[in-house]
Image (cartoon, coloured by chain):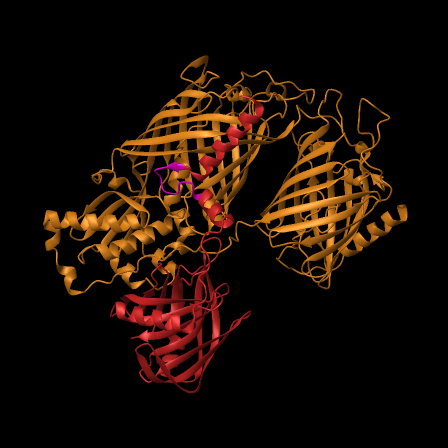
Chain colours: A red, B orange
Amino acid sequence: MSIVRHTRFVFLTMAALLIASCGNQTDQGVLIKALRGQYLGGKQAAPALTRTQLQAGISASLRANKLPQKLVRIESRNANAIMVQIEQNGSYKTWATGDRRSVTFRRGIVTATRGLGQDIMSSDTQQVSTLINGRRSGNATRAYRYLNGQNQTVTLSFDCSVNTAGRAHYRMGQVNAAAVRVVETCQSDRLTIENTYLVSSSGTVVQSRQWLGPINGYFSIELLRQ
Amino acid sequence: MAWVNRSLLLIGSALASTPSLIVAEPQVTHSYNMWGVPGGLLDMPTSEMAPDGELATAVTNFAGITRTTLSFQVMPRLTASFRYSALNGYRPIATYTHSAYFDRSFDLRYQFLTEGKYRPAMAIGLQDFIGTGNFGGEYIVATKTIGKRLRFTAGIGWGRLGSFDSLGTTGARPNRLIGAGGELTSERWFKGPYAAFGGVSYQVNDRINLKAEYSSDAYSAEMSPDITNPSAAPLFQRKSPWNFGIDYKVSNSIRVGASYMYGSEFGLNVVLAMNPKHPRIPGGTETAPVPVSVRNAKSARDLGWSVDNSQRAKTGAGMIRLLQKEGLVAEAVKLSGTEAKIILRNTRYDIETQAVGRAARVMSRALPASVETFTIAQSYKGVPVGAVTLRRSDIERLENAPASTMLSRVAFTSGKDLTGLKPVDGAYPRLSWSLGPYAKMSVFEPSDPAKADFGIKLAGDYYLAPGWVASGSVSVKLAGNIDKPPSGRTGFGPGTLPQVRSNARQYSLGNDPRLDYLTIANYARPGKNLYSRVTLGYLETMYAGISGEVLWKPVNSRLAIGAEVNYVAQRDFDQGFGVQDYKIATGHVSAYYDIGHGFHGQLDVGRYLAGDWGATLSVDREFANGWKVGAYVTRTNVSATAFGEGSFDKGIRITIPMSWALSRSSRKQNNVVIQSLNRDGGAKLNVNGRLYNNVRDLHKPEMAKTWGRFWR
């Protein structure tokens, strides 16, 4: 073979193999798949929904089953999802989306996430929960636990002050309730965060905006069905 | 310019004698200098360190001198660097034939005094301290930060760093080549003329850094670059000792710089830095595990299902299916009324702790309420090598508690008691195969910066029964230049040992298919803390024979002891089925120790492939996410002349876990070894499947380090 033809042969074979690296093991060609995704486009971000589209989506979801449902959104990513309650362990309830991302709540306050990136592993929310669900003002502490780059658990602790801030009426999906607005302002030595909740007379959080962590930012949650 | 030197000397000593405060944090910079080591100046060193764990590749160029340096912050106050330099038009030896001179050097810097309110940080450094020492220099330097943006540096240098306008001498500096090269140049350190150097760097904003320095490096050797031609032009004109530069941060990983060196040359600098401690998304982005299912208190007493065989089989099958969804293959399952034991093959998670946690969740959902104890073992080649025993009540109770509370409730066992478990139907025999491209690189050789081979490889493993596996790999080279013959270099010849590794290029000739390896191996558990391996066949590219290994490693221990014995014959160069006449018995006794604080050490003592006796010491910095950076040194009973160029074998090795880059679990990892030279002394057999690294991840010390991932 001449040099030119030989070189072309090599490149064609390599190209073919790179795209079709095969075998029967899992993790086959994982690097190639990842690079492909990165350079050739891959998953596009979902286009923003209009209000009517969103309403239609909610109605369809509520008809699909009888489970409790919430509409959620990570503000920085601007994509809506509907979560369904899939499990309960004592006072902790785990909700999940169809693509296997989950959030665990205790009395409506986020205690853990999985699959959102920089997930909250677990939290201490008992103290703030007494105030928030009780719709009272006061001071309390809370803590979030994350994994660092070396798979060790790191804790972010905050001193919080909870205040009630007027009344509001919440109507969305199959929920219709009079609620009190509760604002939780928390401070650590480096961060200040503010979580807001709409809490009904039974202590249920019907709507909230809660901080998930340094990378994810704020998470908004609206109860569609209890 | 002598007055400048003396003023710098006075400033330096004044700074050093001010009262000290105890501050633990080392002085840190993100900037790298023209030698590829951390520092806010150009050719001169400072006392600055890179952030702990940072691994950086810097490529710098000026006056036809290109330096590619790999720098690693081994500990917060110790930097180690490996450099490959190419000097265009430089010819220090008459027999050298390349147009550029390639040289490898190692540097170390230790910040022995941290910065205080009034006290500067101080460091001591060795530049190019192994081997020919062409760029050799030693220094003591102090750097002080004023305000938030300004840093002043002053220091004294020896060797290269003491060559311009020296202030005095500390004895005579020997210049000879020690041994056959490759040795520590300790007889030169801090000897000979010394000179002062200094500089200032100014951080304009968080992206731009300005630098100015006074260089004490006269570049004497580069002024007469060609030993065969005394009137050859110098590599550059050294018109002034003042250098100026600017550094720009493109992103957290990339920095570029430009400089004006010695009043005559422009310089460029590009740095790519990464830190194993900081992956893009800590904890990864992979999807959620199944939640724990809490039992109904009444049904925990119902044991009826366990005596009904078909019920038990159905339960087992259901659990196996759910485990499969998590990337965990159940190789053996034993269910009784109150206990469940499984042997898992983990095909997805690089962190074994996460595999155990996910399995525990699945079992809480799939098993009837009466089962209270879960024993989850993980296998290597079908043999259980470590197990974790958990109580279901703890799993239910602690799902939302910190991971550390779970760690105190579990027990780690060696898994030996599960070896008799009956394998799941269809688990054996099992074939796993792959076909794909391969790239083999040979970089930073003394006479060639980069050589590579590309081709296609077909590999497979056939698992006959638990612990029995037949493996093979065939590859075909499509293109490459690893078989290029080396060019003339230093005066030292190849040494007088049998050619056990130095003939490596003979195995790369031609494009015919070659048999990489073809073996049958057995893995077993001869005792509670014992693991064994026997491998027979074509063990690696150059050797065929039999290899046997025994490892003693208690599951809670940081120490392990192993012994390996091999009898091998050198294979034919065409890597077919034939062997040559050279046969040798080799073996080692090894001690492995988890030192703590992220360090791991290994000592092997025994006989190497050329028949030489000696020991290898390896030390690695290990990160709990799978990254490893380390170095090894081998000394045997052959003399430096018998060994040949390099005097003794040494190298650097890096392991990069794929999951760190992908932000989700993956069992693939990339292993890079930069070996000093392909010589015949201190050469070990490369046999696949050695026990220690495949066993240790399933034992308590490693699992405890990563326990944060249990509930992930």
Answer with the quarter of the image where residue B407 lies.
bottom left
Overall secondary structure of the magenta stretch?
Answer: loop
A85 up-or-down from A134: above or below: above
Toward the top, the furthest residue is B581
Q: Quadrant of residue B371?
A: bottom left
Q: Nearer the viewer, residue A71 or B281?
A: A71
Tell me if residue B418 can be seen: yes
Where's residue B522, x and y in %? 31, 29
B676 on left or right of B212 = left
Nearest the camera: B488 or B646? B488
At which x and y percent is residue B188? 73, 33
Q: Is residue B653 left or right of residue A47?
A: right
Q: In the displayed image of the protein, which residue is found farthest to the bottom? A: A166
Where does residue B303 sit, x and y in percent of width and height? 12, 55
- Point out the image quarter for the C terminus of chain B: bottom left
Q: Is residue B251 left or right of residue A193?
A: right
Q: Is residue B627 magenta?
A: no
Where on the picture, by quarter, is residue A56? bottom left
Please report the residue visible at 24 percent of the width from the left and 70 percent of the height from the top. Answer: A66
Residue occupying the point 72% across, 22% down: B96
* Front in this rendered view, residue B267 or B109: B267
Q: Which residues are magenta?
A: A22-30
- The percent coordinates of residue B697 (x first, y second) are 39, 44
Q: Is residue A23 magenta?
A: yes
Q: Report the side of B365 relative to B510 (left or right).
A: left
| Total tally of numbered discs in the picture | 0
Q: Is residue A89 above or below residue B439?
A: below
Whether residue B481 is visible here, answered yes or no, is no
